[in-house]
Image (spheres, rainbow, N blue to C red):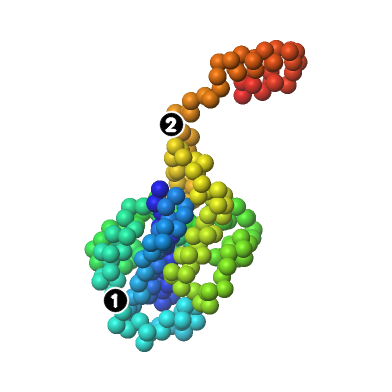
Amino acid sequence: MREIVLDTETTGFDPKGGDRMVEIGCVELVNHIPSGREWHSFLDPERDMPQSAFEVHGLSQDFLTGKPLFADVAGDFLEFIGQDRLIIHNASFDVGFLNAELKSVGDSSIQMDRVVDTLALARRKHPGASNSLDALCKRYGVDTSKRTKHGALIDCILLASVYIELIGGHQAGLDLARGARVATAGEGLTVIEPRPSPLAPRLSETEIQEHQAFIATLGAKALWHRYKDQ
């Protein structure tokens, strides 16, 4: 199963008000494990950089001038993410900016039914607690020492570790669910659907008969009889 952890940096909060993306980062997960494949680009927003945004990510107008426009990298970006599930923290923010840029170049919008919002996952798992990426990294012991400012790619790497913890820790990378199908439920929740057909029993006929003989010795009031058919 392939998933893409995605993050953006922007000039502000409102793509409808003229704010633009200035960085996109993506990290590929295969069966919930980082594969080593990444996609990253800085973007020229063709506008000034507000001081408040610069203080968050440290990307100046001078640095970004001459970097690719979104139109220049849109094809490569869409090819990398394919049709796979996107893992995004506070997804409505990033998807809003992505869809504004995709619309500007005539490409189809990203639909929210393919997105897992890790903020929604965290709020369900830790109601009432701070669920920012920083707070989640601290809660799960994810090393943030290499992160001095927000950056799309480094935040993706951190979010990949947080996401694994949110869905059950490193066991999610094991093949315990092999044969099951992963689906996305409402509000970005990830669930494991049952196998389409059960595994074949491993007990021999002799073992089954010996077990039944043992149960017969327990008497009619044994708790076993209350739960065996549930």
Where does label 2 land, which residue?
196
Nearer to me, 103 or 86: 86
Marked residue nearer the N-terminal end (1 or 2): 1
- 25 versus 208 height, above or below: below
Where, by quadrant of the figure, is residue 41 drawn? Answer: bottom left
Residue type at the position of mark 1 = Pro
The answer to whether residue 110 is left or right of residue 185 is left
Q: CA distance from mark 1 to mark 2?
A: 47 Å
- 13 versus 219 height, above or below: below
Residue type at the position of mark 2 = Pro
Report x, y in % for residue 126. 62, 55
The answer to whether residue 162 is left or right of residue 12 is right
- 14 versus 185 height, above or below: below
Where, by quadrant of the figure, is residue 224 drawn? Answer: top right
Q: Which mark is residue 225?
A: none
Nearer to me, 64 or 217: 217
The answer to whether residue 32 is left or right of residue 226 is left
